[in-house]
Amino acid sequence: MADLLASNDTRPANLDPARSFQGLILALQQYWASWGCVILQPYDMEVGAGTFHPATTLRALGPKPWNAAYVQPSRRPKDGRYGENPNRLQHYYQFQVLLKPSPPDLQELYLGSLRAIGVDPKLHDIRFVEDDWESPTLGAWGLGWECWCDGMEVSQFTYFQQVAGVECDPVAGELTYGLERLAMYVQGVDRVYDLNFNGRTDDKKVTYGDVFLQAEREYSKHNFEVADTAMLFEQFKMAEAACQKYLAAGYSAGAAAHDMALPAYDQCIKASHVFNLLDARGVISVTERQGYILRVRELAKACGAAWLKTEAGGAG
Amino acid sequence: MPDLLLELFSEEIPARMQARAADDLKKMITDRLVAAGLVYEGAKAFATPRRLALTVHGVPARQPDLKEERKGPKVGAPEQAIAGFLRAAGLASIDQATVQADKKGDFYVAVTEKAGRAAIDVIADMIPEVVRGFPWPKSMRWGTGRLAWVRPLHSIVATFGPETEEPEIVTFDIDGIAGGNVTRGHRFMAPGEITVKRFDDYVAALERAKVVLDPARRMDMIRADAKDLAFAQGYELVEDEVLLAEVAGLVEWPVTLMGEFDRAFLDIPGEVIRATIRANQKCFVLRDPTTAKLTNKFILVANIEASDGGKAIVAGNERVIRARLSDAKFFYDTDLKTKLEDRLPKFSQIVFHEKLGTQAERIERITALAKELAPLVGADPAKAERAAQLCKADLLTEVVGEFPELQGLMGKYYALAQGEDEAVAQASEDHYKPVGPKDSVPADPVSIAVALADKIDTLVGFWVIDEKPTGSKDPYALRRAALGAIRILLDAGIRIRLTEMWESTFGRLQFSAAFREFIANYVKAAKDIEKLNLPGLLTAANDAAQIYLKSAEVKAREKTRYPELSKGLLDFFADRLKVQLREQGARHDLVDAVFALEGQDDLLMIVRRVEALGKFLDTDDGKNLLAGVKRASNILRIEEKKDGKSFAGAPDAALLKEPEEKALAAAIETAKADASAAVAKEDFAAAMSAMAKLRPTVDAFFDKVTVNADDKALRENRLTLLNEIREATRAVADFSKIEG
């Protein structure tokens, strides 16, 4: 792995992953780019986790190899705490890696990425602790672990078995780094807002709080108190209908090929996020909740099926 | 004789699956060895996070040769039969068969000799089969392969050979994984390849490569080190075998370290600290042996001898635990801000069971029943009522949401914090008891009332909706509930008529079901839900349900339904009681003999009767009386069948001829009267003594008197007398149910 680390020596001090949030992101990007991943930018829609990015959900399906890494801002409306909790956020960053087929040395590659951000496995206690992953809304599941560093969960490691209701063949390996948590660990910080964002220590220092604290307060109020539920209910219905419409339109040349899987899937993502907002507003009862999850899953499954009829999905 | 070494090396196996997997591996391989005629001397299996290993020693080098004889048709049988035989036996011509003779004449026999194969070849066939069919609770595929394992499988060590020689590698191929003799050591401390020969050098090589193969040894190491570390600081380890086993399954090389957290967190209840540290961090807590209270130290088990002696690891774990305890403290402090009773309204939105209504309805029923039970168990009804109302409230607290295993206990803390009576608070914790056979039963009468009410409501509820346990399936833990109720009643010596207790619950359940149905109907009928008047609706549904339940139609239906349900539940209790008493060494047939009497639903009295009966049957009087009663019953059974009628009623005194039968009739009169009087006073020992007095007269009767006399009237009268023996003993038990 030495060649992947060579660049560390030339890195400016303020990009040291142990000092700088963005330095951590850059180090991970560099590591996975050196390995050969496509480095993508965040998907331009609100999603609950990096997994929702079509570069994971859809690309995990079908026979074609795919290796990608990207940062994905993730929104969990319910997790907002008005900026008052030291480690709960309604908006945070995940670093997502998807390797299909999963290479035989995926664990070693992962450990290499920890070294790249300054976590030395000879000094720390790195553990792979059972954690089976399941996303009812995506109709997806996989087996893997939570990766622990000195008792702290720093990543999720999953071998996808099924996505959008479709068996994964070949199997993709997914790594998800919770960037804030990982940064808090390597920077030795107990409150997320105290993270050093840009790695400067002088008057140009910018903290995570400088960037996001106001947003956490505003969005917590929005998510829990103000978000327009009548509009959201409508949006859910509209996204659902649009998704179905685009899925149908994509089969214009017959059932063997689809040419609108991505736009259809966007509407599925939309529906999922709107549901999360409604859930945070507390207007969905326990019994209805299951129904909404099922409706999103149906969309995801139909999008997955459509994807398999596209070129990137391996059709033709 | 040769030994087999097998190691399946993979990515991290979930801790909870390791022990079972090691057992399965051993069983699957050794069963197949035995089936293949390879009877081995011994086998042992091990698991670490990254490997399953098996050693089988003393395996024969070859399978025994097999000689198989197949009997064919008679000599001279039709050609078709002979052709069929040749085909089945795999012979080319009938000359290859031998001819044997038996009583019926000469017939063909095909003798095929199957030479035993080399054991290593048999094993080579066996391993892929075992790997492919391994019963992991959940398995997965990886990369482009089709093989399924718990996590990606990387390599397999498989060697076979005698102790004195270089063992051979067992050759096979499972999706590209071949048998070999190379494994790897600890992931971080000795990741290089290791070539192994057989089990002994394998274990030693692993140990040098920082892997302790035997999970039991890893557990011992952790336990001993943890205790030493604690002792050195004057503390005591809070032992936790379940956690220990889990932690031993997370490390190949256990390194036990101690960390600490801020003393201020010790304001949180100790159980919350322990649950936090245990569930999230898999660390042990320590207590001060002088006060038995938790200290601000914890023990963690790392998988590595770190280059700084573990400083960074301890510091990291301390930070995580600090964050976790901050959360726990926040939850706890938040919980304390809301009174338990203020949480109750939310229960009306939480469904307990689709057919049994909401938690709120359930709490209401439990409260009513607890109040009803209070005087019977010596509890203050007002306290029992209050305790029942609050006993489930902690389910809605943050701490219990986070740590469900703390339900009840947190309720107690919160109840005390808001100034509830101590007995009321204690009931929050104790009404769940006994949770298992080893758990204690609640002691305070208030807790007893709530615990019984909770269990009875559960049992009757699920009985009413016909969700009874079947076979090994008991999703609502009804057996545990019944056994719990039995233990509480017996331990505290409580007299309760079970059937009365569940009759009132039955009524309440009927009411809430009817109430729900009326509400649903009204809502369905309403055109505009927005305009429904909620209080009016509730009153209307309430009234309608009351009237409906009093209707003749319902009464008629319940008249048959309730007794059936009650009988079924009583049988269920009888079965649980039998299990319970059998564990204490009592005979289950005695329980049957007592339950067979009419109206037995007071468990305490049933058990007293069973005890008295057991003691009585241990005496000579008891044994002989039992023999006499059985003899009488046997004769009666035969004669009743012969005559097609029973011989009930009192014997005619005028027809009592022999002195022995007169004496018996008199003795029965006395015994019946005395036994009934004793039973009325619940003095079962005295009732048995009264029965015992029957014995000599019964014996004398059978000695001297011929029952089946020629005189028809005499015979019938004597049979009536025999029936009286049986009847008399029914004052204490149904002797016909007693074995022996």
Image (cartoon, rainbow, N blue to C red):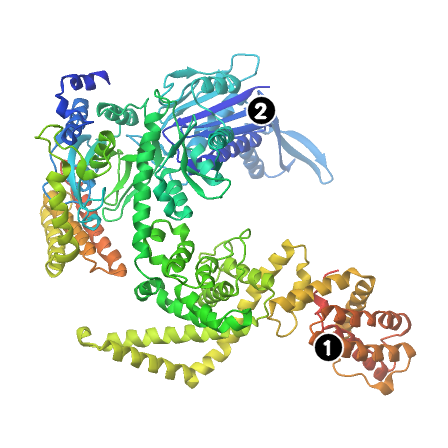
Q: Residue at x 60, y 39 (%)?
A: B78
The chain carrying label 1 is: B
Quadrant occupied by the C terminus of chain B: bottom right
Q: How many labels were placed on the picture?
A: 2
The disc labelled 2 sits on which kind of residue? Gln
Which residue is outermost to the bottom? B654
Q: Residue at x 18, y 34 (%)?
A: A195
Per the image, the residue denoted by label 1 is B676
> Where does the image place residue B426, in percent across and percent down from the top left?
46, 59
The disc labelled 1 sits on which kind of residue? Ser
Per the image, the residue denoted by label 2 is B63
Residue B735 vertical position relative to residue B588 in the rendered view, above or below: below
> Disc 1 or disc 2, which is closer to the eye?
1
Quarter occupied by residue B465: bottom left
The chain carrying label 2 is: B
> Where does the image place residue A187, in percent across and percent down from the top left?
22, 30
One can see residue A157 in this view: no
Q: Please, what secondary structure does the residue beneath circle 1 have?
A: helix
Q: Please, what secondary structure does the residue beneath circle 2 have?
A: loop
